[in-house]
Amino acid sequence: MKGKVNLKTLEKELELIFQTPQFVNSEKEKKLLDYLVKKTLAKEYIKEAHIAIDVFNKDGDFDPSLDSTVRVYTGKLRNKLETFYLSEDSKNSTIKISIPKGHYDVKFESRKKSSKLNRLKFITALFLLHWFYLPFLLYTRLMRKTIYSAIQKLLPEILFGKNTQILIYQH
């Protein structure tokens, strides 16, 4: 988000996120997200070792190459945030909070940008509908008419012999 982040809006967003089913019983992910947001807003460089010590209460001799706790929980947090923003729970969100892969700093985006993405998804869906689904529907409808007309011609012959006609109702 360009410019400064409105702290009250951000606090409301975090409250909204923490009340959802994805986060209700996830104290570690809540604590991690809160920590990452605060450090990002303070413009501090976030290191994996600092997260391990401050959030997960690891010892000062924490070695990230031997312990993947921070990376695992950050991955879970990313997934939960994505799930949140794809769910109905996020319909009142004005900010999208994300953590880019390979980083621990948090990104804040206006949800107006997300609506552009939703429009793009909608246009893509229309394109797919127009070029793939509608021709399939027309083809199956054409096939159905062909099958009905074949039944209409063959069934009377099979049941009653040649030169008999029966009208079959088509819908």
Image (cartoon, helix red, strand yellow):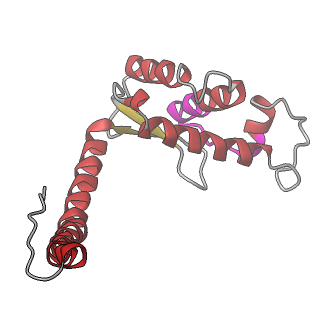
Q: Is residue 35 left or right of residue 60?
A: left
Q: Quadrant of residue 104?
A: top right
Residue most toward the front? 160
Check residue 46 for magenta coloring: yes
Q: Residue at x 72, y 48 (%)?
A: 71
Relative to residue 137, is residue 97 depicted above or below? above
Q: Position of residue 101 (x, y in %)?
A: 57, 54
Quadrant location of the N terminus in the rendered image: top left
Q: How many marks?
A: 0
Q: Nearer the viewer, residue 150 or 128?
A: 150
Q: Which residue is drawn at 58% across and 44% down?
A: 79
Check residue 19 for magenta coloring: no
Q: Is residue 1 left or right of residue 47?
A: left
Q: Residue at x 50, y 18 (%)?
A: 15
Quadrant location of the C terminus in the rendered image: bottom left
Q: Position of residue 170 (x, y in %)?
A: 12, 59
Residue 45 in sight: yes
Q: In this view, does 169 lie to the left or right of 73?
A: left
Q: Where is residue 108 in the image (x, y as percent from the top left)?
A: 42, 38
Residue 139 in sight: no
Relative to residue 98, is residue 14 depicted above or below? above
Q: Quadrant of residue 112?
A: top left
Q: Which residue is drawn at 26% across and 58% down?
A: 125
Range covered by the magenta-colored residues: 36-49
Q: Quadrant of residue 46?
A: top right
Relative to residue 37, is residue 117 depicted above or below? below
Q: Where is residue 95 in the image (x, y as percent from the top left)?
A: 37, 32
Q: Which of 99 and 156 is in front in this view?
A: 156
Q: In this view, does 137 lie to the left or right of 51?
A: left
